[in-house]
Amino acid sequence: MKLITFVGTGCYEPILYRWGEREHSTRFFSDALVEWLQPKTTCVVLTEVARQHPNWQELEPLLRGRTEVRGGNSQHPAKRVAGEARFPAPSGRNPLPAVEPYPQHLGR
């Protein structure tokens, strides 16, 4: 499984995340997701400013050793294209059904 997550420069306060019977206390939701889902790879999307921010400096070591980290300062960085991070598309078919860009039930 691959997890795609984000980290920014906001003030992340410690909180107890709950999912069903599971609980995980952390400042970062992505830390809780890695704990619960145990993905093989976690792709972290962040800006250049966020890459230098203490949030990433704290989160990256929390993820290492539990998942392969891509993006950020990892050894397997995302490809950089015109200031954007691009991750390779997963192989195989998308198991999710196609969704209209603007569902009719929302109106226009």
Image (spheres, grey):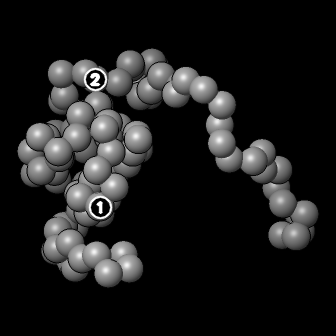
Location of the C terminus by quadrant is bottom right
Residue neighbourhood size for the residue with mark 1, other residues' Cα within 10 Å, grouped as few (<14), some (14–19), many (≥20): few
Q: Which residue is mark 1?
A: 36
Q: Secondary structure at mark 2?
A: loop
Taking the spot 23% from the left edge, 34% from the top edge, the residue there is 68
Lower position in the chain sequence, tag 1 or tag 2: 1
90 and 85: which one is in front? 90
Which label is found at residue 77? 2
Q: Secondary structure at mark 1?
A: helix
Residue neighbourhood size for the residue with mark 2, other residues' Cα within 10 Å, grouped as few (<14), some (14–19), many (≥20): some
Can you say whether 78 is above or below 32 in the image?
A: above
Can you say whether 8 is above or below 49 in the image?
A: below
- Residue 74 appears left or right of 107: left
Q: In x, y percent, where is residue 22?
A: 28, 75
- Whether residue 45 appears in this view of the structure is no
Location of the N terminus by quadrant is top left
Q: In x, y percent, where is residue 45?
A: 36, 40
Q: Tell me the kind of residue under disc 1.
A: Trp
Taking the spot 29% from the left edge, 50% from the top edge, the residue there is 38
Which label is found at residue 90? none
Q: Nearer the viewer, mark 1 or mark 2?
A: 1
- Residue 104 appears left or right of 26: right
